Image (tube, rainbow, N blue to C red):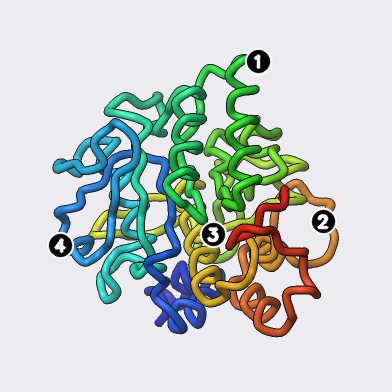
Amino acid sequence: MRAAGGTPSPAELVRLTALAARTVGRPDVRVGLIDGPVATGHPDLASATILGVGDRPASCDWLGTTACGHGTFVAGILVGRRGSDAPSLCPGCTLLVRPIFGEEHDADGVPVSGPAEVSRAVVECVEAGAAVINLSAAVGHPTVRVETEIRAALDYAAERGTVVVAATGNQSTLGSSEITRHPAVLPVVAYDRRGRLLATSNIGMRVGRSGLGGPGEVTVFGTSRGGTSVATAFVAGAAALLMSLFADRSASEVRHALLCGPPRRSVVPPLLDAEAAYRILAGRRPSQLVSTGSRRWGAARL
């Protein structure tokens, strides 16, 4: 189905439709959502398996707040009910909600959290069994010490075979952060419905060479939002679906399939091509891809 005006739907834009038709995801594939709390009582989330991680309440009631609205929006992309207006990519997967911010936000309305809190959230999601982590919030006030802490948390995720998918941010800047330049992270920029980069997306050499683009204009539960945090959920959802279909493949193999393509020299990464990633995993034996690790999704460093 195409959106009004003949433009592709967000899922069509990144060739996710066929992949989502093959599976709703498996409950043993856990997706960590590091964002705001989620309105778990929403009728289009009622059938989803949503578990809280950490000390902050994972559930919220009022979608009018930045924290609840943002977390619920991203959750809808991932595990919303199929048949609702949400993309509902992997509703059969288990969603681990680890809130990292409350009602505070910056002048642009972008959720912001401290680096130490983000580091703890990554570690806690990994320890809770996350195969994929969706990180959509900006990190404020970096210092050398907390950047080291973030790096250690991401190293730990890589060692445990967890794919971390992170938004680059929406400040129209050139460069990278401690998160998006980490070799284990898939940084994500946002594209519009016509396949053009949203000018607000942060870009850079690391992002262009090792990142992906996702749909940055989406409607969920009657509300429209945009930006890299929205796009990130499409890449995380695609990874979760691939892991559901190819349980014998490591995180390294899934990441390789998502990124597979010609060498890149641009600061702007290409759009996700979920169908191409599926065909790579379906058409090659594990030994033809990146070597697997000892854990289910691989223990090798990414």
Inspect the image, locate mark 4, and give the three-letter code of the amino acid beneath it: Pro
- Where residue 264 is drawn, which disc sits there? 2
Inspect the image, locate mark 1, and give the three-letter code of the amino acid beneath it: Val
Of tags 1 and 2, the one toward the viewer is 1
Question: Could you tell me if the residues under marks 4 and 2 are in contact, i.e. CB atoms within 8 Å?
Answer: no
Question: Could you tell me if the residues under marks 2 and 3 are in contact, i.e. CB atoms within 8 Å?
Answer: no
Which circle's residue, 3 or 1, is located before the other in the chain?
A: 1
Percent position of residue 115, x then y: 51, 24
Q: CA distance from mark 2 to mark 3?
A: 19 Å
Q: CA distance from mark 3 to mark 1?
A: 29 Å
Percent position of residue 123, x then y: 50, 37
Which circle's residue, 3 or 4, is located before the other in the chain?
A: 4
How crowded is the residue under tag 2: few (<14 C-alpha within 10 Å), some, or many (20+)?
few
- Where residue 43 is drawn, which disc sits there? 4
Of tags 4 and 2, the one toward the viewer is 4
Q: Secondary structure at mark 4?
A: helix
Q: 88 or 64: which is nearer to us?
A: 88
Tell me what residue is drawn at x 28 percent, y 32 percent: 56
Of tags 3 and 1, the one toward the viewer is 1
Which circle's residue, 4 or 2, is located before the other in the chain?
A: 4
Q: 102 or 63: which is nearer to us?
A: 102
Percent position of residue 98, x then y: 36, 40
Q: Secondary structure at mark 2?
A: loop
Q: Which quadrant of the structure image shows residue 155?
A: top right
Q: Secondary structure at mark 1?
A: helix
Q: CA distance from mark 1 to mark 2?
A: 30 Å
Tell me what residue is drawn at x 40 percent, y 25 percent: 106
How crowded is the residue under tag 1: few (<14 C-alpha within 10 Å), some, or many (20+)?
few
How crowded is the residue under tag 4: few (<14 C-alpha within 10 Å), some, or many (20+)?
few
Tell me what residue is drawn at x 74 percent, y 81 percent: 284
As drawn, which residue projects farthest toward the front? Answer: 294
Residue matched to label 3: 235
